[in-house]
Image (cartoon, rainbow, N blue to C red):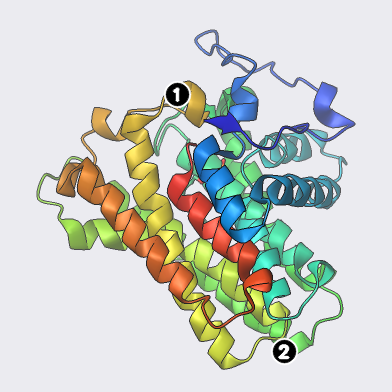
């Protein structure tokens, strides 16, 4: 694979801050090139092939989008008293990451005729929520992980108390941010977005998925239905609310919303199926987080239940279903969502 979008992972002026006072001795920093690998990585062949077909340069597109998103995120959490919590929030929020959820939100908004500005506050909010879920997921009481996005996890740097609070503060800020910063969108639509995002985070979304995931650990009777529930809630729900929120903010009618919801459900499940595959096929360096974790804790995954080859076919089928939902749009306008779906299938990290 090749790194497709090399750009500065941490926005100034905080790129020089190294608040590592709480790092335990056992934590070794990953090699310095890990950070670039924690961004958009695809196979060279695939991206070239896709580009020839569509004339759309996904690499360039995501590089530009991530720069815009990173700049907006940088502004969203200012450094102020008590500094340590803002530093901890910024540490994880600006630690890189592929920015798939905000990119989906912006692309969906533009597809239905909206602008980047209309969707950017929600795009930032989605990344805040995603980041807080990663911070909490990595805690010793959950997955107990040392590395995320190629760096020591939040609690390894700031301690558990601060990591919990940083997650809480990011979650709270996300909803405040949508309500406070969304401009040029009818208030009713902003409310609709808050409901959509809220639903995708709580017990009907991420939290519900995480609960069933935790309860299923070590249970060898977990089957495909339970696994699908976990994946659809823990991972797909936020991707769905990213796409659907973008469409709502861009002024979409019900037909477009329904179509894009179907698209997002397919890419959402595919995203986690690919995650399951990468856990056994990619290295810790490539992933920027510990590889082989699912196998180590005997977690049910698509490869463990249906095998690696069938898992790849399922991802392929889901992405084909997603792309089919875009058939009625102008191909040039749908190119970003089309390429994002393709990327989710081919991604290497
Ligand atoms: C949401 C209130 C609230 C609590 C959190 C811990 C938890 C409840 C849920 C876990 C959610 C979780 C960690 C799901 C995994 C989703 C996933 C596939 C993450 C990896 O996403 P990428 O590959 O990561 O987009 P980057 O780092 O690129 O952003």
Instruction: Look at mark 2 in the image and give the residue it sits on.
Output: 188
The image position of residue 76, as x and y in percent, is: 81, 52
Q: Is residue 67 visible?
A: yes
Q: Is 106 located above or below residue 216 in the figure?
A: below
Q: Secondary structure at mark 1?
A: helix
Q: Could you tell me which residue is drawn at 64 percent across and 83 percent down?
A: 192
Q: Secondary structure at mark 2?
A: helix
Q: Is 226 located above or below residue 166 in the figure?
A: below
Q: Is 307 located above or below residue 178 in the figure?
A: above
* Label total for image: 2
Q: Residue furthest front?
A: 52
* Mark 2 or 1: the one toward you: 1
Q: Could you tell me which residue is drawn at 60 percent across and 46 percent down?
A: 131
Say left or right for 73 vs 202.
right
Q: Could you tell me which residue is drawn at 55 percent across and 69 percent down?
A: 241
- Quick check: is the Cβ at mark 2 less than 8 Å away from ligand 1? no
Nearer to us in this view, 195 or 268: 268
The image position of residue 145, as x and y in percent, is: 45, 29
- Comes first in the chain, label 2 or label 1: 2
Q: Could you tell me which residue is drawn at 63 percent across and 74 percent down?
A: 245
Which numbered marker is on residue 284? 1
Displayed quadrant of residue 129: bottom right
The image position of residue 49, as x and y in percent, is: 53, 48
Nearer to us in this view, 42 or 237: 42
User: Badge 2: few (under 14), some or many (20 or more) residues near its Cα, within 10 Å?
Assistant: few
Q: CA distance from mark 2 to mark 1?
A: 44 Å
The image position of residue 71, as x and y in percent, is: 84, 47
Q: Residue furthest left?
A: 221
């Amino acid at each position: 694979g090749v790194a497709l979008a090399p750009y500065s992972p941490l926005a100034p002026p905080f790129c020089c801050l190294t608040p590592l006072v709480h790092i335990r001795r056992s934590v070794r920093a990953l090699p310095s090139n890990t950070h670039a690998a924690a961004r958009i990585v695809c196979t060279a062949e695939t991206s070239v092939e896709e580009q020839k077909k569509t004339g759309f340069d996904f690499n360039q597109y995501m590089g530009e989008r991530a720069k815009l998103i990173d700049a907006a995120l940088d502004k969203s959490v200012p450094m102020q008293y008590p500094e340590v919590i803002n530093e901890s929030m910024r540490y994880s929020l600006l630690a890189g990451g592929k920015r798939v959820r905000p990119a989906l939100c912006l692309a969906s908004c533009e597809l239905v005729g909206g602008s980047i500005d209309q969707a950017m506050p929600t795009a930032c909010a989605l990344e805040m929520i995603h980041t807080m879920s990663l911070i909490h997921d990595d805690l010793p009481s959950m997955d107990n992980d040392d590395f995320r996005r190629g760096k020591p996890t939040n609690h390894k740097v700031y301690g558990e108390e601060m990591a919990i609070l940083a997650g809480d503060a990011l979650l709270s800020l996300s909803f405040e941010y949508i309500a406070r910063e969304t401009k040029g969108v009818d208030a009713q639509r902003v409310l609709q977005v808050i409901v959509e995002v809220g639903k995708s985070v709580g017990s009907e979304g991420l939290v519900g998925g995480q609960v069933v995931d935790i309860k299923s650990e070590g249970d060898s009777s977990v089957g495909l239905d339970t696994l699908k529930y976990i994946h659809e809630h823990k991972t797909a729900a936020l991707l769905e609310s990213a796409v659907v929120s973008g469409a709502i903010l861009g002024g979409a009618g019900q037909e477009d919303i329904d179509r894009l919801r179907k698209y997002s459900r397919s890419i959402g499940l595919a995203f986690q199926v690919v995650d399951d595959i990468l856990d056994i096929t990619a290295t810790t360096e490539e992933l920027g987080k510990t590889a082989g974790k699912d196998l180590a804790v005997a977690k049910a995954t698509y490869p463990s239940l249906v095998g690696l080859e069938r898992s790849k076919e399922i991802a392929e089928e889901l992405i084909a279903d997603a792309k089919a939902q875009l058939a009625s749009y102008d191909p040039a306008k749908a190119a970003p969502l089309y390429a994002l779906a393709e990327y989710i299938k081919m991604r290497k990290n």
